[in-house]
Image: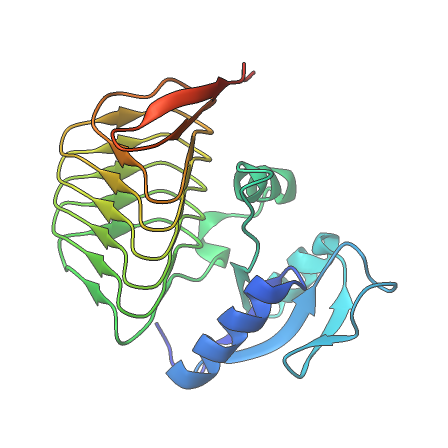
Amino acid sequence: MNRSMEIVILGAGRGSFELIDLLDGSGLRAVSVLDDRWPDGPGDVGGVAVEGTLADANRHVSMGRKLLMGIATSRNRSIRCEIHQRLGIEDNAWAVFADRSSTVSKGADLGAGCIVYPGARIAAGARLGRQTVVYFNAVVHHDSILGDGVTVCAGVLVAGNVVVGDGSYLGIGSVLRDGVRVGKRVLVGMGAVVTQDVPDGATVAGVPARIVRETEIA
């Protein structure tokens, strides 16, 4: 990635504040924040002005800027996917950011808008979909496939050959054993140890993880 690239951040919450800090440390430059609460929401995030709504993203892209999304929440696990689809912006308009203290194998594949936080490790053969975020000190082992908009919280361990569906959220410190299949929009609770496949829309918790709630998804 060009170190002088100008980055526009989507979302004016605390996640974007954290992301702006990381970009500053990398030498990349966050130049604007977009948030749908504008002009009634925050005026700036970490000193970077909020200058419009998400609908203004195309204007910034036309100026040669790249986009990153600072939005993630367990309450709406598919929000990153939804925003990506709603904006309909080509994948090449989205930056891919991996902190310099992370380890990303040359044999791994990161989709548009992916963010890899400090201390995270992405092994050879791993594939991350669009808008997937891997937080501090999480590990994604060899040949695992994470779908679009997956959130991998701090300290998560995803073993080899795991598949995680679009919009799923892996809570802090959770573990997914090798070979398991996790469906779409699944919530894995903090510290859970997933040893068996998990269906779409389920919430799992415990050691070993058990289904505590099931939600139908469209």
Left or right? Give the position of 192 relative to 121: right
The residue at the point 41 percent across, 51 percent down is 112
The residue at the point 51 percent across, 48 percent down is 90
Residue 62 location (% of width, % of height): 62, 63
Q: Is residue 27 visible?
A: no
Give above or below for 217 relative to 205. Answer: above
- Residue 99: quadrant of the picture: bottom left
The residue at the point 19 percent across, 45 percent down is 126
* Circle count: 0
The way the protein has been coloured in the rendering is rainbow
Give above or below for 195 relative to 145. Answer: above
Left or right? Give the position of 36 relative to 190: right
The residue at the point 74 percent across, 71 percent down is 50
Quarter occupied by the N terminus: bottom left
Left or right? Give the position of 60 relative to 66: right
The residue lying toward the viewer, choosing from 212 and 18, is 212
Quarter occupied by the C terminus: top right
Give above or below for 92 relative to 79. Answer: below
Left or right? Give the position of 134 relative to 61: left
- Residue 67: quadrant of the picture: bottom right
The residue lying toward the viewer, choosing from 158 and 6, is 158
Residue 75 location (% of width, % of height): 59, 39
Residue 39 location (% of width, % of height): 86, 65
The residue lying toward the viewer, choosing from 206 and 5, is 206
Please, which residue is most extreme toward the right here?
40
Residue 2 location (% of width, % of height): 37, 77
Q: Is residue 121 visible?
A: yes
- Residue 7: quadrant of the picture: bottom right
